Amino acid sequence: MSGESDLRRLLSGMRPELNEGRYVFCTLPTSTRAPEGLTPVATVLEPEGLTLVLRQEDADAAGLAYDWTAGWITLRIHSALDAVGLTGAFAAELAAHGLSCNVIAGHHHDHLFVAADRAAEAVSVLEELATRSARW
């Protein structure tokens, strides 16, 4: 099944859901693999190292350093990988409320990482955007 690409449908149907827990971004040297027993939400290999997005308690247990704690929001609409405008629209809306956002796209959904202490607020902002978009 292919994803949705119509921007109005994407925004009005995004159904942001706050996942349980707190998440962190940790970096390991490029030649290093993730420690045994860890299940990252996402990994990104960059020249500077391997980034792991993990539950905060898993990073703490493994002794991994991090400098930011996030809440993880999943947009529950199946967005097409080539859809245009979704990231820009929700990022602009969050920015207008002083909320930073780190985005990771999976094959089916977009995943937003926002400051943990403002995650519930970010969900509310996104829900309001969805409501407004449904009235277009």
Image (cartoon, rainbow, N blue to C red):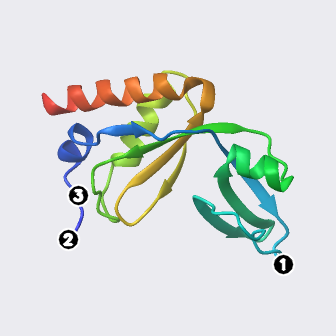
Identity of the amino acid at label 2? Met
Question: Residue 42, percent across and down?
Answer: 59, 61
Which residue: 49% across, 21% down? Answer: 97
Name the N-terminal-most of marks 1 and 2. Answer: 2
Asked if residue 101 can be seen in this view, the reply is: no
Q: Where does the N terminus fall, quadrant-wise?
A: bottom left
Identity of the amino acid at label 1? Ser
Viewer-proximal residue among 69 and 47? 69
Viewer-proximal residue among 63 and 130? 63
Q: Where does the C terminus fall, quadrant-wise?
A: top left
Identity of the amino acid at label 3? Ser
Residue of label 2:
1
Name the N-terminal-most of marks 1 and 3. Answer: 3
Residue of label 1:
31
**Residue positioned most to the bottom:** 31
Which residue: 24% across, 47% down? Answer: 10
59 versus 95 height, above or below: below
Which residue: 76% across, 54% down? Answer: 26
How far is the residue under mark 1 from the one under mark 3?
38 Å
Specify few, some or many for label 2: CA neighbours under 10 Å numbering under 14, 14-19, or 20 or more: few
Q: Are marks 1 and 2 in contact (CB under 8 Å)?
A: no
Camera-nearest label, 2 or 3: 2
User: Looking at the rendering, which quadrant does residue 56 occupy?
Assistant: top right
Residue of label 3:
5
Question: Residue 18, percent across and down?
Answer: 45, 37
